[in-house]
Amino acid sequence: MEFSNKFKKIAPSPTLAIDAKFKQMKAEGMNVVGFGAGEPDFDTPSHIKQAAIDAIMAGKTKYTPASGTIQLKQAICEKFKNDNGLEYAPENIVVSNGAKHSLINAFGAILNPGDEVIIPAPYWVSYPEMVKYNDGVPVILYTEEKNEFKFSPAELEAAITPKTKALVLNTPCNPTGMVYEEDELRAIADIAVKHGIYVISDEIYEHLIYNGKVHKSIASFNEQIKDQTIIINGVSKTYAMTGWRIGFTASNAKIAKLMSNVQSHSTSNPNSIAQEATIAALTGPKDELTMMIKEFDSRRQYMVERINAVEGVSCKAPNGAFYVMMNIEKLIGKTIKGKLIESADDFSEVFLSEELVAVVSGVGFEAPNFVRWSYATSKENIKEGIDRLERLLSDVK
């Protein structure tokens, strides 16, 4: 009995694995501190939860159209108009079971076997697996910390081949926190139009941005790049709604129709109650979002300052999302607590076993000399985690 060759090629998510291990250790009573989770530690705002309760009481618990209710699609269109200066109609919107589902749909709609997708590294761990799941070929475009983990137009041009079908663009970025400026995005858009390739623009962290930076959607420059762009977004990060599982795409109507058709057979509609809550999130007050961003910014500055004060490691200050990539290059080839450090995997294992601190190895991000910290946790936890880092690195040989 032979299993699916395609499914056997798909690796498990290392970020979810480290978070699961952290939660198991905590449940066993161990004093573990976790920095692996990619979710806000704030609660979903009360008016959003109330909208869900009201929806239940009103009996809005039945099937909806497969790609989402017209009311939610209209709210999403208004969001794109107000936040991004983009005009979309409900026929351009597909609502799915989280942004991961939206990405699976997007790759599925455009890829044929052998099509190449350019993925800048460090990247969110699921992108290459999603491309492979849809019979595409991931092509990794490596970036460097000294360039803020951004690729240049020349580097992008060099990565394009006759088989290139799409580019993944994630800004603000998980895991690096980098943000592309408007002039950089315009150059990328020009190249995409020139070569006729799609842009999968993952903008899930668009509101979590600091240092006076402004998020700009690549689709907003002209009609041609808009037609070639599939925007991925959702409510999980912005509104602390990770468990509600609502993501959405905006694309040209033909692509949206393809995604809707497949979704009608795979998952049917997104959760009806969560859709009502999402309307409240998109159209309601933003006071708690403003508070959340302010707190994230304070934690970001504290974490960066503390890490850069620890001998042997360093980091760049991110401008978006809620992650810091810590450079451990100076530790490679050395030993900690008798363990030889040859990669971020080794460092992460020692940090967890010796000091009970869970961070995410950069190996899964194609960044083997880095580990990712999430500051979607309290400042008290951040202080404790970096205190333990200092203790761990006092035994480097």
Image (cartoon, rainbow, N blue to C red):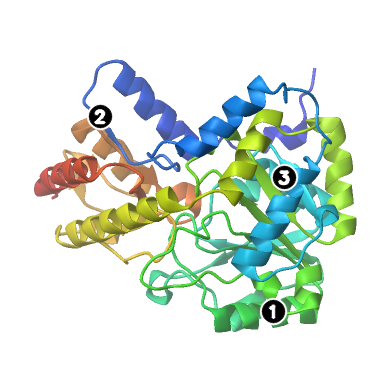
Can residue 370 be seen from the camera position used here?
no
Label 3 is placed on what type of residue? Leu
For label 1, the crowd category at 10 Å Cα-Cα, with few meaning under 14, some 14 to 19 and many 20 or more, is some
Describe the element under mark 2 as helix, strand or loop: loop
218 horizontally vs 111: left or right: left
Label 2 is placed on what type of residue? Val
358 horizontally vs 102: left or right: left
Q: Is residue 261 above or below residue 8?
A: below
First-in-chain label (3 vs 2): 2
State the residue position of label 1: 221
Which residue is rendered at x = 50% and y = 62% of the image? 172
Which residue is rendered at x = 58% and y = 25% of the image? 53
State the residue position of label 3: 72
The residue closer to the viewer here, 307 or 332, is: 307
50 horizontally vs 310: left or right: right
Describe the element under mark 1 as helix, strand or loop: loop
Which residue is rendered at x = 80% and y = 58% of the image? 115
Residue 395 in picture, x, y percent from top left: 10, 45
The residue closer to the viewer here, 209 or 308, is: 209
State the residue position of label 2: 32
Residue 302 in picture, x, y percent from top left: 21, 57
For label 3, the crowd category at 10 Å Cα-Cα, with few meaning under 14, some 14 to 19 and many 20 or more, is many
The residue closer to the viewer here, 289 or 104, is: 289
